[in-house]
Image (tube, helix red, strand yellow):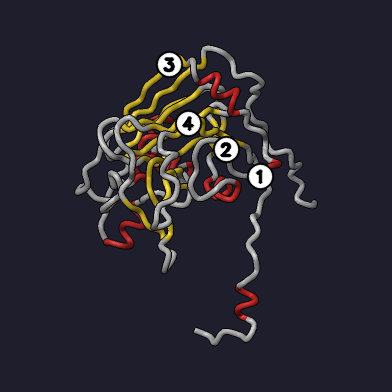
Amino acid sequence: MNTPPNDAAIRKGKPPLVCYKVENLPFVDMPAINDARQHLEKTDEVIVAPRDAATFSVPAGHFFRINSVEGSQVGDLNLWNANNLNERFYSGKTRQLHATHVSTGDRLWSNLPHLRPLATITHDTLDWYGWDKDGGGVHDVIGTRCDPYTNHNLTDADYHYCCHSNLCRALADHLQKPISEIEHHVHDVMNVFMCTGFTLDTHQYFMKASPVRPGDYIEFLADVDLLGALSACPGGDCGSSHSDDATPCYPLKVEVFKPKQSIKGWIGTQLSGYDGSHGR
């Protein structure tokens, strides 16, 4: 390590500045959303088997819930614009605009050049968790997804039920195309129910046992027509291991709901207004 300069303390002592003024983001009328979510009609239900994934569709203006049903289990969520798979969830920008872990009132943003909310979190039964003594929180947008490529590099073994592989199979089945033609659409995830953070000493990404229990759920409002895919992670509650068949795993349930009354003032979200010229 290099010797610190004489003014090291001054350089390191500069105050932090939050990068984005989120007050300028599109307004989320949570009272109007909460009024609508009191009267919902279930239109679809999908069970995601352990160490597997499934797709689901949500029309714009409808709600969907991801439920813990049998045991403590985390899920890896991908979202696409159902009418254009090139528009998909962008975890990095969501993290910058909101936080490393998201909850009620936060939105899941799409990739460039679209950059708009795909879904809004409308209820979260784990919002009580906050931040623990290790710096951990629930529902992260910092992890990528367990995948067979990283696993092979670390263990020299092929494991086919990582979340990336699960999502690939589910999307390929939905589109009725070979995985080789659709794998590029599978993207960084929202880690639903997963408890993660960065270690306080070495700042390495860590996971710990999820606090989720049967009956817990996280609920979203679809801001556009959505195609979703959810993997029930082979890590189970992610308190011991992942990318193997050793950890107890449980199914997850996705429910889709239609509001019986329209959401007052809701019009969905619009694509970014940037003209795309990039100075040319």
Q: Nearer the viewer, mark 1 or mark 2?
A: 1
Q: Quadrant of residue 48?
A: top left
- Closer to us: 66 or 34: 34
Q: CA distance from mark 4 to mark 3?
A: 19 Å
Q: Position of residue 84 (x, y in %)?
A: 56, 32
Q: Check disc 3 and report the residue beneath it.
A: 43
Q: Residue at x 41, y 34 (%)?
A: 125
Identify whether 57 is placed above or below 233: above
The quarter of the displayed image where residue 206 is located: bottom left
109 vs 218, left or right, is right
Residue at 27% x, 53% y: name it: 241
> Which residue matches tag 2?
87
> How far apart in space, not on screen, are marks 2 and 4 (Cα)?
24 Å
Q: Is residue 138 found left or right of 214 in the rendered image?
A: right
Residue tagged 1: 22
The residue at which mark 4 appears reads as: 123
Q: Which element is circle 2 on? A: strand
Mark 3–mark 1 contact, CB under 8 Å? no
First in sequence, mark 3 or 2: give its number: 3
Q: Residue furthest right?
A: 280
Q: Residues within 10 Å of mark 2 (few under 14, many from 20)?
A: many
User: What is the three-letter code of the residue carrying label 1?
Assistant: Val
* Dot placed on the residue nearer the N-terminal end, 1 or 2: 1
Of the two numbered discs 3 and 2 in the rendering, the one whose residue sits closer to the viewer: 3
> What's the residue at 29%, 47% (across, down)?
235
Labels 3 and 2 touching (C-beta < 8 A) = no
Of circles 2 and 4, the one toward us is 4
Q: Position of residue 226 (x, y in %)?
A: 51, 29
Q: Quadrant of residue 189?
A: top left
Whether tag 4 and tag 3 are in contact, CB under 8 A, the answer is: no
